[in-house]
Amino acid sequence: MRIAEIYSSLQGEGFLAGTPSTFVRTSGCNLRCHWCDTPFASWEPIGADRSIESIFDEVESLRLQHVVITGGEPLIFPEVVPLCSRLRRSGFHVTVETAGTVLPSTNNWPSAGDHALADLMSISPKLSSSAPPADTPARWQQRHAAARRRDEILHALMAEGPYQLKFVIDSPADLTEALCWLNDLGIDSGRVHRERVLFMPQGKSVEELDRTTAWLAGECLRTGIQLAHRHHIAWFGHTRGT
Ligand code: SF4
């Protein structure tokens, strides 16, 4: 599988924010979000193909119990299944970050319990405002629109085990769309657990995050959805390898 980078840092988002972790960033994505903060793993993917054993050896050498498999979109790589299995069998806590638009390519899916892909499935569905401009080459606006929302896949991933569902919110229109989407997914009937949903402000600087958080906090209180910070921007800035 193609790997852009492997590094250690603190998790900046979600339930495990602050946890020292090794990040394995796969390179390649089936979407093209216009605000993508890792374009080197989507728009212009870098990196070389690596074997599972070489990835495992590098993760092991960094000596941290938590591992985050991120991207790009890790689930487009069939090898993510044996990699996660190898890591979990060796005692690592594995989080998989995905946009929730594809399922792992394996005959063993869905899995469960000790055989689940990850200890935490971190799903970040992409709202319509993530679309790239109409003049983007290779018909990426249409391809993005066709691929970005797959509710049946979100349900399959949430059924896999512990999960967090993270929506990046930039505007009141984003908020309205996320709440409608959650309604469609069944947040009121319990198919989606409200306490596992997070709203995060969009932004690549502390100032941008603060501007959105100023109005989003009140909306989180009103709707009963957890407000999640993006600590890594404040801790390290918008830089690679963090
Ligand atoms: S899904 Fe993630 S990695 Fe892919 S383009 Fe969107 S933000 Fe970037």
Image: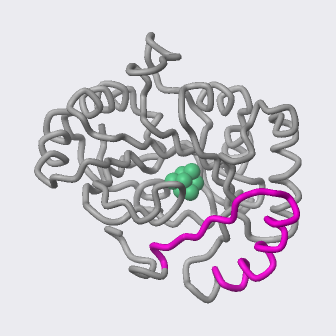
Please determine whether, in this image, residue 208 is positioned above or below residue 9: below
Q: How many marks?
A: 0
Where's residue 143, x and y in %? 67, 43
Frontmost residue, 191 versus 204:
191
How far across and how far down the image is residue 119, in percent? 43, 36
Q: Which residues are magenta?
A: 209-233
Q: At 25% across and 55% down in the image, what residue appears?
A: 6
Check if residue 187 falls in the magenta segment.
Answer: no
Q: What colouring method underlies this structural image? A: one colour
Say which of 78 and 168 sits in front. 168
Seen at 76% across and 57% down, the residue is 225
Residue 135 vs residue 119: left or right? Answer: right
Magenta stretch contains residue 221: yes
Which of 123/10 is in front? 10
Q: Would you place residue 140 above or below residue 221 in this image?
A: above
Q: Main secondary structure of the magenta part?
A: helix
- Foreground residue, 181 or 14? 14
Q: Position of residue 48 (x, y in %)?
A: 24, 47
| Image quadrant where one finds the C terminus | bottom left
Which residue is drawn at the image coordinates 68% and 43% (left, top)? 148
Which quadrant holds residue 181?
top right
Say left or right for 160 vs 81. right
Instruction: List the single residue furthest toward the bottom.
Output: 207
User: Ligand 1 shows up in which quadrant of the image?
Assistant: bottom right
Q: Quadrant of the N terminus?
A: top left
Horizontal side of residue 132 vs 44, given as left or right:
right
Q: Residue at x 37, y 49 (%)?
A: 68
Residue furthest toward the top? 107
Residue 145 x, y percent position in the rendering: 74, 45
